[in-house]
Image: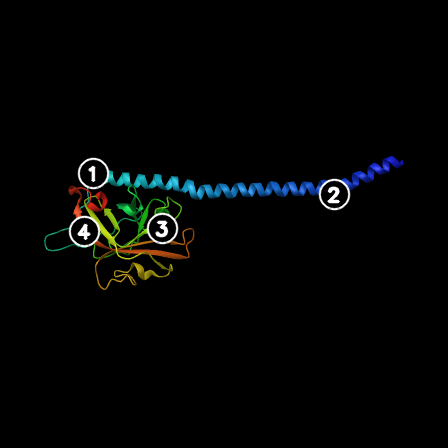
Amino acid sequence: MTARSEARRRAGAGRRPGAAARLVVRTLSEGCVTVGTLIVLFVVYVLFWTGVRADSAMDGEIGKLKDRWSTAPAAPASPDGAAGQVGGPAQQPRYENGTSFAVMYIPRFGADWSKPVLEGTGTGVLKKGLGHYDRTARLGETGNFAVAGHRRTYGDPFKDFPELRPGDAVVLTDGTTWFTYRIDRPPYTTLPTDTGVIDPVPRKSGYNGPGRYLTLTTCEPEWGHSHRLIAWAHLDSTQPVERGRPSALTG
């Protein structure tokens, strides 16, 4: 082997580790780009696509409710929340799990804010609207009508929950009656294990006896679920839908 050939061989051997290092760096870089792209796509899915699907599902539920009410309206509620009958109120059947039965409006969250309320609080239910805790009172009844909703994702229905203030209206309709509740205190933070917040007379609410109450619950912090935010309200007024929208929505 000539001296020149030996020099070329040694030079090539010296270059090989550098080429291998560059290959490793390039592979790692491509891997990082791939992982970053997947993270971005996941964030887009969580922030955007779940919201698009949830908004469509909620609009669909409200549309179904309006169609149902236009063809077969529910029996009007009496002042204590049960269907009015001669001889006193009757015990009402439970709502059907997974089925929408009311629409909620919270003017504090915007003039166009309206969400369907469905029976149950399972994952599938909360993708389509707000969920009614099945062990709590029916809408307008004596007791505690308790409702849960996502703070973020799936349409962000309760994104602005911390903005609720005493006196704010929460209005619901079941197709025959408007129910206007009024918030009694700023949102309260507690743990998920504190189930007493949805008792008939919710603990730590400040209520001293039976009444017609509303409890709203959502996650805290905004992008977590270690705690819960709670808002309590009392039934302030009712009116038949034939009389038009209540002043809480028109004023």
Q: Secondary structure at mark 2?
A: helix
Q: Dot 4 corresponds to which residue?
A: 237
> Is 160 located above or below residue 203 in the figure?
above
Q: Mark number for residue 17?
A: 2
Q: Secondary structure at mark 1?
A: helix
* Residue 1 visible, this angle: no
Q: Mark 4 packing: few (<14 Cα in 10 Å), some, or many (20+)? A: some
Circles 4 and 3 in contact, beta carbons < 8 Å: no
> Is 22 located above or below residue 231 in the figure?
above
What is the residue that sits farthest to the left in this orientation?
Answer: 86
52 and 244: which is toward the camera: 244
Work out whether mark 4 precedes mark 2 in sequence or the reverse, and give the earlier one: 2
Image depth: mark 1 or mark 4 in front: 4
Which x, y percent locates residue 58?
32, 42
Give, as a three-letter code, the residue at label 1: Ser
Which x, y percent locates residue 142?
21, 57
Which x, y percent locates residue 166?
27, 55
64 and 185: which is toward the camera: 185
Spatial CA distance of label 4 from label 2 is: 81 Å
Work out whether mark 1 precedes mark 4 in sequence or the reverse, and give the earlier one: 1
What is the residue that sits farthest to the bottom in this orientation?
Answer: 208
Q: Mark number for residue 122?
A: 3
